[in-house]
Image: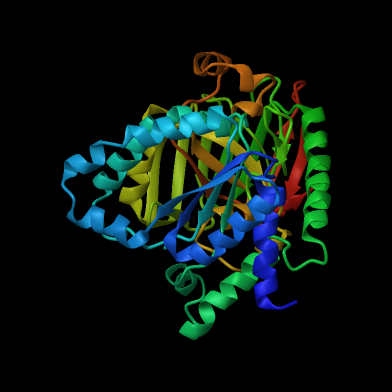
Amino acid sequence: MNYESLIDRYAELAVKVGVNVQPMQTLVITAPISSAAFVRNVARKAYEAGAKNVQIDWTDDELTRMKYDLAPDEAFREYPMWRAKGLEELAENGAAFLYINASNPDLLKGVDPERISTANRTAGQALHTFRSYSMADKVSWSVIAVPSPAWASVVFPDLPKEEQERALWEAIFRATRVDTEDPVKAWHDHHAKLNEKVDELNAKQYRFLHYTAPGTDLTIELPPRHIWIGGGSVNKDGTSFMANMPTEEVFTAPLKQGVNGTVTSTKPLSYQGNLIENFTLTFENGRIVSAKAEKGEAALTKLIETDEGSHYLGEVALVPHFSPISESNIIFYNTLFDENASNHLAIGNPYPVNIENGANMSNEELEEYGLNSSITHVDFMIGSVEMNIDGETADGSREPIFRNGNWA
């Protein structure tokens, strides 16, 4: 199959499996202007699937960098509330949301971390209500990625410049199963396999997870009636969708104050245009009490200081080392892909759907139940072929979950 046909398949997959557009539904696409040709393809597929309206929210890396370099500090302390309220209204009316990522991992290199932190905090506070719709799976949403020249040059620096973007497209096709005979069927089959693990873990209801690996000795307590989730989700109207494409994880929420020990990253974290590498976090009663990084420590510190909740974890995710993205031996410098090659954790807000009836709980009720609350949610990778994970049951017995980076 030729290159253009694979791109067409990818657009169709985003519409039919990612957000699963329904007749007379509005689709909101957030995308960089560099992906305009692909966005037009997605919009066409959405209208063909019966969408009532397709709205595009364009972004531009050059304008983003320009603002950080030239705007006054006050610019990062305000957010256009008309946009936040507009997104809330779209969510309340049942719109679906597709996010297309093509960002440069080094976009904000050299920018004052305080500016980035202020901008993130401001946006997080303004968009908190809107994001709660996604976190509780009340709306259909999906995140995919397309290459950009800047991103491709970071992933494939040794290739000739004219070959980098094509190589990244091919890697994305493999990671998202676009290159299979029937991508839609491949995704349904993949969802079923992930849910086999989900069912096993939910039946176990482990009380603690114990992680050991070079630089890692960590214990995570899980809340009672926690729920593991993997693959696709279902929105409040009963429509299925795939929030991340690709996805290889099964995940749940930790008890906010139940994390103790030290964990070391195994892949770079691309966070808000900065790379954070080789970092170690130490937890006491859930709270991060020490954070060290070989590269990007200032950005890491500002991330943790976003708010009180960003000092705690919100997600625990299991991904076997023997998985398609990991076995590609490609570091994508993009969390959407790298988190699906590695066990990972997330700083910040949990997904309410990870506890029984959590989607119907208020923030206060979730906090009373023992879950974290934050305006941010940032995944970071900790898995390797050397990682072992044990689960401790309610009676105190321990069972192997992972051995040498893979399901035991």
Q: How many marks?
A: 0
Query: Residue drawn at (67%, 32%), measured in percent from left and top?
Result: 235
The answer to which of 91 and 240 lies nearer the viewer is 91
Q: How is the image coloured?
A: rainbow
Residue 200 image-quadrant placement: top right
Query: Residue drawn at (71%, 21%), measured in percent from left and top?
Result: 225
The answer to which of 264 and 245 lies nearer the viewer is 245
Coordinates of residue 186 in the picture (x, y in percent):
81, 57
Coordinates of residue 25 in the picture (x, y in percent):
63, 39
Query: Residue drawn at (60%, 62%), measured in percent from left and top?
Result: 41
Can residue 64 be seen?
yes
In screen coordinates, is 48 left or right of 62?
right
In screen coordinates, is 218 left or right of 302?
right
Q: Is residue 106 above or below residue 153?
A: above
Q: Is residue 202 above or below residue 174?
A: above
Coordinates of residue 403 in the picture (x, y in percent):
74, 50
Can residue 127 be seen?
no
Coordinates of residue 299 in the picture (x, y in percent):
34, 49
The answer to which of 83 and 195 lies nearer the viewer is 83
In the rendered view of the protein, which quadrant contains the N terminus? bottom right
Q: Is residue 110 above or below residue 355?
A: below
